[in-house]
Amino acid sequence: MFKKVLISDDLGSINQGVSTVLKDLNIKNVSKVQYCDDAYLKIKKAFFDNKPYDLLITDLSFQSDHREQTLISGEDLISVLKKEHPEVNIIAYSIDDRLERVRRLVKLGVNGYVCKGRKGLVELAEGVIAVSEGGNYFSPKIAKALGDKTNLEIDDYDVKLLENVSKGLSKDQISVLFRNKGISPSSLSSIEKRLNKLKIQLCSKNTIHLIAIAKDLGLI
C-alpha cells in the first residue's frame, strides 16, 4: 500500500473526504493542496529531497481566483508530471465523466480515473488499492464505455467530425473547415463515407440519432 499521498482539489470538503478514505486504508502521510501549481511544486521538491510521493489524487477542474496560476487544470498538472516523472502514480478524481477526456488522460498515462458521485469515495478506495498493486482502475460507468469505444475503433478524426456535426455544420462546411485547418481527409466524399461508417458502428438510424448516441457515450 502507498505510504505518501498528495491530494489536489480546490474544495476543502473534497480534500477532507479523500483524506478519510486514505486514513481508512492506513495511509498516514497525506498532504493536501488547493492549487495545481502547489501540487507540482510539492511533488518536484519531494523528488529533489529523495522522498517522493507514491500517489497523486487530483481533481481536473479548478476555479480561478485572484491568484495567477501556470497550471490551471488537473489535466495540465497530469500532462506535465507524466512527462517529467512518468513513474509517478496518478488517479484523477472528477465529476467529469466524458469519455473523450478520460481517453486523453489514458494517453497521458494516468493510472486511474474515478468519477465523483454517490459511490465516488468507495470507488476511490478501490482505485487506490488497485493502483498500489500495480494495476489501473476506472469507475465502472466509464470502464464499460472505454471498452465499447476501443472495440469501435473510433479515433480523434471521428470525434472532431462528430463535434462539428453536433454544432450544426453541413458536410460541405465541415469539408471546407477541415481543408483550411489541414485536417485529412477533408473531401466531401470522405466525410460522407466516414459518417456512414459511424452510423453503422454506433447502430444509429440517422444523423440526429448518431449525435445522441455519441453524447451518451461521452465522445462529444
Image: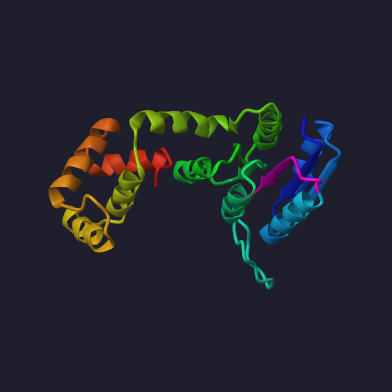
Q: Residue sitting at 43 percent across and 42 percent down?
A: 218
What is the magenta segment's predominant secondary structure? loop
For the residue pair 201 and 39, the one nearer the viewer reads as: 39
Q: Residue sitting at 29 percent across and 40 percent down?
A: 210
For the residue pair 133 and 97, the one nearer the viewer reads as: 133
- Relative to 8, residue 89 above or below: above
In the rendered image, residue 55 lying in the magenta stretch gets the answer yes
Residue 116: quarter of image: top right
Question: Percent position (x, y) of residue 183?
Answer: 27, 55
The residue at the far right in this view is 28
Residue 203 appears in the rendering: no
- Relative to 139, residue 10 above or below: below
- Relative to 105, residue 179 above or below: below
Residue 156 appears in the rendering: yes
Q: Which residues are magenta?
A: 50-59
The answer to whether 124 appears left or right of 200 in the picture is: right
Question: Percent position (x, y) of residue 143?
Answer: 51, 30
**Scheme of colours in the image:** rainbow
Q: How many marks can you see?
A: 0
Q: Quadrant of the N terminus?
A: top right
Q: Residue sitting at 22 percent across and 49 percent down?
A: 185
Question: Percent position (x, y) of residue 56?
Answer: 70, 45
In the rendered image, residue 104 lying in the magenta stretch gets the answer no
For the residue pair 184 and 137, the one nearer the viewer reads as: 184
